[in-house]
Amino acid sequence: MKFVIGGRTLDTNSSAVISSVEGLEPDSIRKHQVDVAGVQFPPKQVLGAVSGWDRQSFTTQEARRVLEKLGFKCRRIREDSHSEEIESDEDVSSDELDTVRAALDVVNLAVAELARRVTALEERR
């Protein structure tokens, strides 16, 4: 599948994601996690591994969007002083998620177009 993230295109699939994290030691999980082949990782670590991009160049939400579309289960860890329970995103309606995803797709396309225009202007110099 092709994804636009911060104006860059990533063409990947679930097999590539699994291969990219094989043997990788998971970083500590702060707020979000994704299950890849039975191992919990921070979503940004997984997207960084499969893309080769610096993790600061994309958001956790972008990483989750890509990984969820590839079929991986992402969760948010509930911040609670008594426990670290996993909070399912099923608390949010699918219509709300679809609306946010659609808006994010529009923003990503706009950023990609802006990046293309900047590149064209720089080439004119």
Image (cartoon, rainbow, N blue to C red):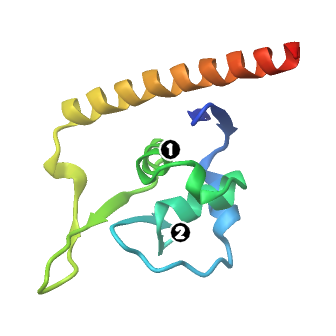
Q: Is residue 44 above or below residue 114?
A: below
Residue drawn 47% across the image and 50% down it: 59
Residue 66 - label: 1
Amino acid under disc 2: Ala
Between residue 85 and residue 31, name the one nearer to us. Answer: 31
Q: Quadrant of residue 102?
A: top left
Distance of mark 1 from mark 2, alpha carbons? 16 Å
Dot 2: element: loop
In the displayed structure, does residue 82 sit left or right of residue 122? left
Residue drawn 30% across the image and 32% down it: 100
Q: Quadrant of residue 121?
A: top right
Between residue 114 and residue 8, name the one nearer to us. Answer: 114
- Percent x, y for residue 7? 62, 31
Residue drawn 47% across the image and 67% down it: 42
Image quarter in which the C terminus is found? top right
Residue ID for mark 2: 37
